Amino acid sequence: MLKRLWSRREWILVILGGLALAVALTWPTLRDPRHTVPGDIGDPAMFAWQIAWGGHALLHDPAHLWDSNTFYPDPYSLAFTDTVLGYAPFGMIGSGMEAAILRYNILYVLLHALAFVGAYALTRQLGAHPLGATVAGAAWAYAPWRLAHAGHLNVISTGGIALSLAMIARGHGWSLRHGHRPERHSPGWALAGWLVGAWQITLGLAIGLVFAYVMIAVCLVAAACFGWAWWRRGRPAYGRKLLAANVIGGLCFAAATTYMGLAYARVVELNPQADRALSWTETYSPAWRGLLIAPETSWLWGDRHAGARAELTWPPEMALLPGIALIMLATAGMFFSVFRVRHRILLTVGTLAAVLLALGATLPWHGDPGYLTLSKHLPGWAALRTPGRMTLWTTLLMAILAAGAVSAFVATARTVAPWPKPGTVRWMPLARGKFVALRIALLIPLALVVVEGINRTPHPEVLRYPAAMGAAQEPTLVLPSGGSLEMSIMLWTTNGFPRIPNGIVTFVPAGQERIRTGSVTFPDAASVATLRAAGIRSVVVLPEWLSGTPWESVPGRPIDDLGITREEIDGAILYRLG
């Protein structure tokens, strides 16, 4: 009873501590969460729109979830880029642009807390001491390389990976430290782990696809070990309920993966130009030195690594430092750990494999065999154009090694300077001093990991919503069209979700190209006819953004005899096409 009570208290403290740490290490995200976003006003605006659209579609037209209000009239537009569909239920709470920004910022903080709790749960299940698990959780959730992806919600939403593995391991009564204990089987935990994994898949295939292949590999290894044990010692204890939980959970996981995959496959079918060649992977493959370089927004290392970072061709995807403290702790964990030697060897091999995959085509043999081999032969892998994101697996495996090392440090400290025995009246000053010093020293790894996670991420204010869009009749074209402004335009549409041909991804859909090309001479007879034929009923022009674009002279062009009207509203120009 006492043990169960302590267990509950531990998890309450972990969750509350994880939330507090997330608020602190993502600050100032929650200082002005209705008007600012972490990173820049590009990708965060797009993801805020994605979540809002998902909630809107689930409430009003779930059958057309993938056919968003952007990129009109092209279908499956929600799948034009990696989508965080799993957050869509949160989009059902609140409405409008301010709610979308607030929702995004809250999720941004919560995903860091979930990553911490997930890694803590995984390493605790594997046999780490609470302090070791805390270090692993902080190292996984706040690794310096993540700071380069502050705007990529799909990349940093990884908490479900560690949590899913933790639950499945618990459901099977398995840990690195104690091995397989059949008496601890729990079908409920196993099923929950698979469902969390399925949810993780819906947060984007940029990270989820690799996770899916990892789960397949885990299942194959587990099946091989089961078969080996059966052949050596007879049928191992397993149970029908646990088997049923795995079958049902595995099917849910496969269904989520298939559902997401089919949507993206449909996009490539309709837009062949969306298919990514291997040249993308070669372009974004980082040099090995990138593994030791932190992003610009790292408080501790940002300025110190500026010179080295300048030599990287694309720092946002090539500054991959998992943390100097983590590297040191993981290295120590290879030789000094509570985990068994064979497990440490496997973790080390896994870490090295993840590193080699993260380097992509920059290896001496150009990544084949390696990342490019997987791109050629595994379905969907070719779309993963940024090998450096494999660093998340490097970080997770190193966090497990670090947890084992810190746990061993704790065990040694207990031996060298144990707690005073019950009933002890006096405690010798020397013994007390050694006890306190060792306990303080044990906190140093945690402090180092946390300090490396401190950010200096900018939090710009999002662009103000143009009142002209609220007065426009949809479908509405916003000019200029193209460039990063498109992401803000997508965010603006969370006020009512009017249909727009605007939007930006790594390819140009056919419908958008047709409308964009036809609007270059707007307003004239040909462009008005083209837009009307495409169903466009209004055009909103933003004069302050026109400089250097094909639409620079639009405000000065006459509209005589075109059958359209023009109205200036708060600095923008609204054309009604009738």
Image: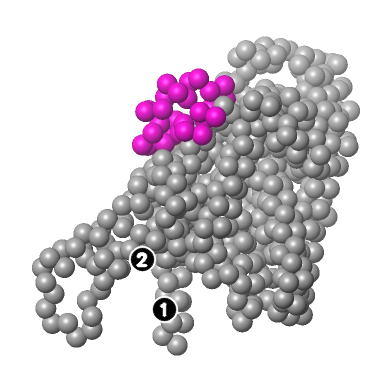
Query: Which of 528 and 547 lies nearest the eye of the viewer?
Result: 547
Q: Is residue 321 left or right of residue 76?
A: left
Q: In this view, does 168 lie to the left or right of 8?
A: right
Residue at the spot 71% in from the left edge and 65% down from the top edge: 225
Q: Earlier in the sequence, mark 2 or mark 1?
A: 1
Residue at the spot 61% in from the left edge and 56% down from the top edge: 161
Contact check, label 2 and label 1, Cβ < 8 Å: no
Find residue 356 and report its image quarter.
top right
> Of helix, strand and loop, which mostly describes the magenta segment?
loop
Residue at the spot 56% in from the left edge and 57% down from the top edge: 342
User: What is the CA distance from the residue labelled 2 to the residue labelled 1?
Assistant: 20 Å
Quadrant location of the C terminus?
Answer: top right
Q: Is residue 309 magenta?
A: yes
Q: Can you give x and y, in whole percent of width and height, for residue 4 in the image?
A: 46, 82
Q: What residue type is labelled 2?
A: Ala
Query: In the drawing, what numbered circle is on residue 411?
Result: 2
Specify whether residue 495 is in view: no
* Residue range of the region highlighted in magenta in the rendering: 288-315
Q: Can you give x and y, in whole percent of width and height, for residue 228 in the image?
A: 74, 67
Q: What residue type is labelled 1?
A: Trp
Which residue is disc 1 drawn over?
Answer: 6
Residue at the spot 25% in from the left edge and 60% down from the top edge: 438
- Label 2 element class: helix
Specify whether residue 451 is in view: yes
- Indicate whether 558 appears above or below 359: above
